[in-house]
Image (cartoon, rainbow, N blue to C red):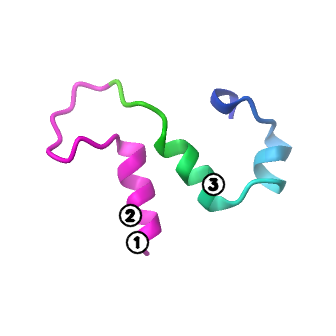
Amino acid sequence: MKYFRMSWDEIMHERSWANICMLMATIPDHSVDNESDGLSPAARMANSLMQQ
């Protein structure tokens, strides 16, 4: 998790699954994808996980 400057132990033992999903959803999408909802793939994944 170098993007968030967290160690492996911090990710595995100190952060919840929901917090990690929300952090991943904040990463900007740089692809040239014309999706109608305007969400990044990480944000779509976080939304689908939260709806389960």
**Residue 2 falls in which quadrant of the image?**
top right
Residue marked by disc 1: 51
Magenta segment boundaries in residue numbering: 31-52
Does the magenta segment cover residue 35? yes
Label 3–label 1 contact, CB within 8 A: no
Residue 27, given in percent of the width and then of the height, sits at 48, 34
Residue marked by disc 3: 19
Q: Is residue 12 left or right of residue 19?
A: right
Does the magenta segment cover residue 51? yes
Say which residue appears at 30% left-offset and 43% top-offset.
39
**Residue 33 falls in which quadrant of the image?**
top left
Of mark 3 and mark 1, the one earlier in the sequence is 3
Q: Is residue 46 above or below residue 8?
A: below
What residue type is disc 2 on?
A: Ser
Residue 8, given in percent of the width and then of the height, sits at 80, 41
Residue marked by disc 2: 48
